[in-house]
Every structure is written in structure tokens, then in C-alpha cells.
Image (spheres, grey):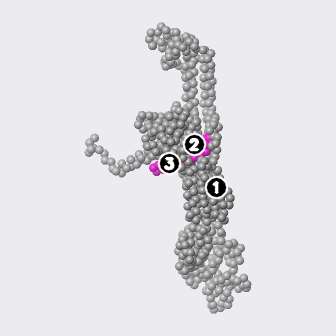
Amino acid sequence: MRDDEMPEVTLRDMYSDYFLDYASYVILERAVPHVGDGLKPVQRRIMHSLSELDDGRYNKVANVVGNTMKYHPHGDASIGDAMVWLGQKELLIDTQGNWGNVLTGDRAAAPRYIEARITPLAKAITFNPKTTEWTPSYDGRNKEPVALPMKYPLLLAQGVEGIAVGLACKILPHNFIELIDACIAALRKEAFVIFPDFPTGGMMDASLYNDGVRGGKIRVRANIDIESKKLLRITEVPFGVTTGGLMDNIVAANEKGKIKISRIEDNTAAVADILVHLPAGADPEMTRDALFGFTDCEVSISPNSCVIVEGKPKFLGVTEILKHSAFLTKDLIQLELEIRLNELRDKWHFSSLEKIFIENRIYRDIEECETWEAVIEAIDKGLEPHKKKLLREVTEEDIVRLTEIKIKRISKFDAFKADEVIKGLEDEIDVVEKNLKNLTRYTIKYYNDLKKKFGKGRERKTIIEEFEKVDRTQVVVANEMLYIDRKNGFAGWGLKKEESIEKCSQLDDLVVFSTDGKLKVNKVAEKLFVGKRPQHIAILRKDEEKIYSMIYRDGRDGPLYAKRFRIGGITRDKEYELTKGSKGTRIMYFAIHESEEESNENIVVVHLKPALRLRNLARAFHFGEIAIKGRAAKGNIVTKHGVDRVVRAPKDFGDESEFELA
């Protein structure tokens, strides 16, 4: 084709095609596991390579990495890292040497210094060349498995994490024994529920797990024991958190004033052991809650279960993944039994042929044959009377095998032993046929044998329980003082030369009531403008249901209103109107009460401005006579007369009956 006949391709089209090709490659070949064996391509190739090299002894990891590069041409570093990850799971790879530490975050030694071999568990659940689907390797020189014939939900046991183009995968590890029990329940068509289980232990609230699909989350806490009033001991850390990182996290929280500790030390070896020393006077339970609230002693994990199904990424819940694995195991076991049955029948067939061939001395019929065709014909003619005893037809291949029997074997043939061999094969065939007829029961037996053989020491490590999320404002150390500059209208912990209000923390909220009847809540800061001469300013304690009593004048000359209210739900940095909002409105009286009883006893004296026909200028008002409402209520009219001031009534105040509503 000439250049002028070439179709035009725009840069946009090229980019679109190349991007889709790259995205498909990353999703299918690198980041997302296969639903069948639960492995990414590099992991599958590592296991296939280990199987190739397996002779019962340890192999240098560097040698395994080199052999794997025949199938995975992406560099030795990626293969080595993937192999270390598999080894640290302690399921498929038996490790020797320094393979790193998931607790401390220490890296493994170089591949030339560490060794590995396949575990007995891996041999039991992972490999069977007869049931494996093969495909050529990238260069066509070798064959590699499309997916290993995995007879266990390895994907859920190990967990996996990967980031691809446009999607991510995060499947959490689950308990070895519980997965087997769930597979058995799935085969029996019984209901089951599975939750994650982490090698680092800890406590887990999985009430929002959502079957491991998008939108779900779990919260995991460290196990913190109170050893004494001055010592906390962390013995288990959340999944994905290292002891070194946790220590740095705790020290940073202490430096920011969110928690209070004197020192911390790490004695982690085979198990986590972090000692948190507390200063004198510290509350150990409060400090433990603060560790959950402000450090990685509690983390939130959002799963995202994505797998490759029939060559495409698909979001499946862990329940569906486990059912897929359980019935795939059943299918694989059926295939293995069928292969074994055919092998036994072939063996029985030839053993029977051999017996007939030797006992009836058919081999003598070929002594005078001059051509190969005549030999085949003579043996076939000699077998003819006995063919009805066989399970299938006699093929030319069977006859060729008979001609290969050595004279020594014919001369030492023992009919009794031959009958015993045939009887043994018949018994084994009966067992296999029985297992095929009761395939579900046989698969369940396989799972139970797996649990009995490999389940010891794999009990659940993570405790499942529901726990409330720590309210940070309740456990943060109040190590700051709130100050206010009323004249200029500023408040914060940095105004140390101004009027002090109360102790606070940097996480607290500040509630401000302005003189013109507006409410606003802000986060406490080092310096914050709150308005000049606010009516009231304080730290907002959400657990305290305070009752506010207020009398305000509507506008410059309007009526006097009284109201009792609770703040209720608020949004930070939003301004709320407590009055009618008229220009010139002013709060004449403001009081705060801890309880309704205290508020009911609140009496004020309203001093009116002198006016014609007004005799009593001082009148009592009883707040207990009006209902407690929300902050948006406008209140009840107290009087329409001009008011000079409103003050709290003295204890010896006399006749309240003189008060009349205007």
C-alpha cells in the first residue's frame, strides 16, 4: 500500500487505542487476581516456577526469580517482592532466612541470601498438571498455566491489593479454618457469613463490612492492656500498621498535645510489644481511648472486592467468591476422579489382556508370522474369544503393547498374583465410582481432611466485636486556655495577655452569642474574630443539654420577647438567628442553666422606662411560665412598653403578681 493510500489516524484515535490496550494489560496482567486460583500473573508464575524446581529441598530465591523470568519478563525486583509477599502469608511457600517482619515493617534480605520451597499445603491444593489448562509463555519457548487448579479459596485466605487503570482491588485476608467451614456450608446450600481475620490480631468491628464490596468498611483496633496507672502495653496492632510507624504516630500525637505520655518503648520481636508510659495523674482509660481516637491504634479499612472473571474485571462480594471457589473445587475433584477412573480402567483393561495373552499362550501364534500385519492379526484372532470379558474394545495400540512384553515376564507369570492385581484395581474402581456418585459428600470430606491436616495453629486471631467510635472531643487532652479580647472581638488560645475563659483543646468548638441575637459555632483557633463584645462565649460541650434563657428587644423600639431554648444540632461556621432579625435588636438578658429545674426557678425583673399612667416600673417575669423550645422560636411577648433594663430578681423580691403582660 502506498503512503497516499494509508488511512488517516488522528492522535486522539492513537491515544484512545493505546490507552485502552495499556489499561487492559494492567488490569488483566498485573493488578487484579483471577477468581479461579486467587493469584495475580506474577504470583502464579512464581508458584509454577517453584513447582518446576521442586525436589523437596530449599532453593535460593534468586534462582527461583531467575527461573520465573522465563514466564514473567518484567524484571527481577517485581518478582522478588511478589515472592516475599507470598512467603509472609505462610500458606504456599516454606521460607528459610530473613523474610522480613510484617509487625515491624523490616524488609526481607536480598534474594541471594534467602531460600524457599513449596509447602505441603500448596502441594495439596494448588498443583495437578492433568487438570491444568496451559498456554504458551510470552516467547513461545515454554508452557505456563492459565490458572492453577486451586482447590481452596486462596484469594480470601491471603487477601490481595492492587491499583489498576480506573479501578482498584482490596480484598482482606480471612481465616483458614472459617473459609473451609464456609465452603462446606456452601456445598450443603446452607447460609454462612465470613469476616476478615488478620495475622496481626487486634479487635475488629465488621458491622459495616458489606460483604467486602465497595461502600463497606471495617474498623480495626490494637489490643491495649492497662498494666498499671502509669503503663499501657500494646500487644497487637491493626492490619497494615507497623510497630515502628505506630510509635512515630503516637509520638506525633503527643507533640501536638492530643494525648499525654511520658515516654514510649518498643520491645517487639515475634509478637508486638509496645510500652506506653504515662505521666503522673494521667487517666489510663482516657489515654487508651485517646490512642484509639488520635493515632493508628484504630484504623478504618475500606474493602473493594474486584476479580478477573472470564477475562474481565468484575466486582464480586466475598460470599460469591467463596461459593465460586467451593463449586470450582467440586468440579476439579470430579475431573480428577474421572481421570483417575479412566486410568484405573485402562490399567485393568491391559492387566486383563496381559493375563489372557499369557495364560492362553497367544504369543505362540506369532512364531510363524512373517510380517508385522500378520502378527497383529494373529494376536487379535487369539483374543477374539475373550473380548466379551473386557470393558472396552481391543485397539491396535493394545496389541502393540502386548508384543512388547518381555520373555522373562512371560516365563515368571503368576496367575494368582495377576488376579490379585486385577481384584485390587476393581476395588479401587468401585471406590472411585462411589465417590463420583456422592461427589458433594466426597468434596466435603476433602475439606475436612484439609482442615484436620493443616488447620492446627490457624485459629482466628482477630476478635470480632462492635465498639463505638471514639469521640475525639471527649478524650483529647485539654491543655490549652481559651482567652478573649472583648474590646477588639478576638478569641483563641494564643491571646495569653487577655481575659481567660476556660480550659480547652485544639479540637473543641467555640459557641458565640452576639449582642444582636445571633448564634455561631466555630472551631477553636489560635486567634479567631468573634465580634466585638459578644453576649456569651464558651466551649461547646455537645453532651451537655444546657437550657438558655433570653430576653431581647425586637428592633430599636419594638416589644420585649422572652424565650427558653436548647441549641440542638448545628453546622460549624453557619450563623443562626435567635431573634426576629430586626435591625437594632438587642439582647437585654441572657442566662444559662444546667437543668430544666434550675431554669424553671429563674426570675428576672423588667425595669420599664417612665411613662404616663405607669405606676409599677419594676415587674417580675417568671421563665418557668414559658415552654422550652428550639433555638428558632421567636419567644413570647413580655411587654410592649419601653424597657430600661432587665436584671435577675433578688431572692427577697416581693409581689410577682404585679407583673402583667403588655
- Of callouts 3 and 1, which one flags the residue occurring earlier in the amino acid sequence? 3
Quadrant including the C terminus: bottom right
Which label lies toward us, 2 or 1?
1
Other residues around mark 3 within 10 Å, as few (<14) / some (14–19) / many (≥20): some
Q: Is residue 324 above or below residue 480?
A: above
Circle 1 is placed at which residue position? 233
Q: Are marks 3 and 2 in contact (CB under 8 Å)?
A: no
Q: Secondary structure at mark 3?
A: strand
| Camera-nearest residue between 146 and 328 | 146
Mark closest to the chain's N terminus, 2 or 1: 2
* Residue at horizontal 56 percent and vertical 22 percent from the top: 347
> Dot 3 corresponds to which residue?
162
Badge 2 is on which residue?
90
Position of residue 458 measured from the top left corner of the image (x, y, whole percent): 63, 43
For disc 2, the neighbor class at 10 Å (few under 14, some 14 to 19, many from 20) is few
* Residue 68 can be seen in this image: no
Q: Amino acid at mark 3?
A: Gly
Q: Residues within 10 Å of mark 1 (few under 14, many from 20)?
A: many
Q: CA distance from mark 2 to mark 1?
A: 27 Å
Of mark 3 and mark 2, the one earlier in the sequence is 2
Question: Is 139 or 499 nearer to us in this picture?
Answer: 499
Picture quarter containing residue 299?
bottom right
Q: Position of residue 38 (x, y in %)?
A: 53, 42
